[in-house]
Amino acid sequence: MEPISSIGLRRRIMLLASGASLLANSSVLASSGVIVGAAAPSFTVPDTSERPRTLQEFAGKTVVLEWTSPSCPFVRAQYEIGAMQAIQSEAAKLGVVWLSVLSTHRSRGDYLDAAKANEFNKTRGATPTALLMDVDGAMGRAYGARTTPHMFIIDPVGKVVYMGAIDDKPSYDAAVVKKSRNLVRAALADLAAHRPVATPISSPYGCAVGYA
């Protein structure tokens, strides 16, 4: 994978998306328009095998959405230290559906077609339930996904219960990431214990999603 130039990196990185702060109110309106505590937007998006996947397909299950990228250093840091793979594995053991989403448009330099995306995902050791090819960006825009990574958790009745960052350390330094508190893990633990999610919204950070 080609390294990103310092100029390109500055253009793509979106650190601490503006205006968001950690809130405990489960009915808070996020800046994207998606409401924590309300129904998650429906979608129909093909996976890397060209199978259409829908939110309705997973009714009755907890679903994690992970916006990802083949070039973002924030995403790369999570995978290089095994943090993202670890939470994916833990989620699977809890019966949680994990959908990684590529909303990168064909016009972008780091766009991958389905076959290359699938191979890339295997190479980095990712184990999502499916990798979705949201090439037109419709799903990403519906959720207001702004960064990679940008995370959403949907509970078994179809309501958004978490949205925001993967962890509490906005960094792509492996040493920093290792010390971070994984907010997705914490939210899934709350759900598994039948508790309200203690931190339902946080500020997403990372690289800008590569929409058209």
Image (cartoon, grey):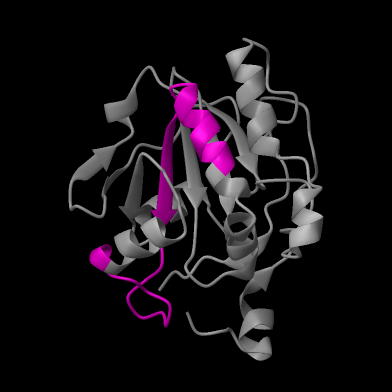
- Residue lying at 33% horizontally and 33% vertically, measured from the top left: 55
Of residue 23 and residue 8, the one placed in the foreground of this image is 8
Which quadrant of the view contains residue 135? bottom left
| Image position of 140 (left or right of 4) | left
Q: Is residue 96 magenta?
A: yes
Residue 132: x and y, percent?
33, 51
Which quadrant of the view contains residue 196? top right
| Image position of 132 (left or right of 35) | left
| Image position of 166 (left or right of 145) | right
Above or below, comparing residue 144 to residue 185 in the picture:
below
Residue 96: x and y, percent?
45, 27
Residue 13: x and y, percent?
66, 72
| Residue 34 appears anywhere in the view | no
- Residue lying at 40% horizontally and 74% vertically, measured from the top left: 212
Above or below, comparing residue 103 to residue 72 in the picture:
above
| Residue 212 appears anywhere in the view | yes
| Image position of 75 (left or right of 50) | right
- Residue lying at 47% horizontally and 68% vertically, measured from the top left: 70
- What count of labels does the image hold? 0
Which quadrant of the view contains residue 177? bottom right
Of residue 199 and residue 38, the one placed in the foreground of this image is 199
Q: Is residue 61 magenta?
A: no
Boundaries of the magenta span: 86-115
- Residue lying at 53% horizontally and 54% vertically, measured from the top left: 145
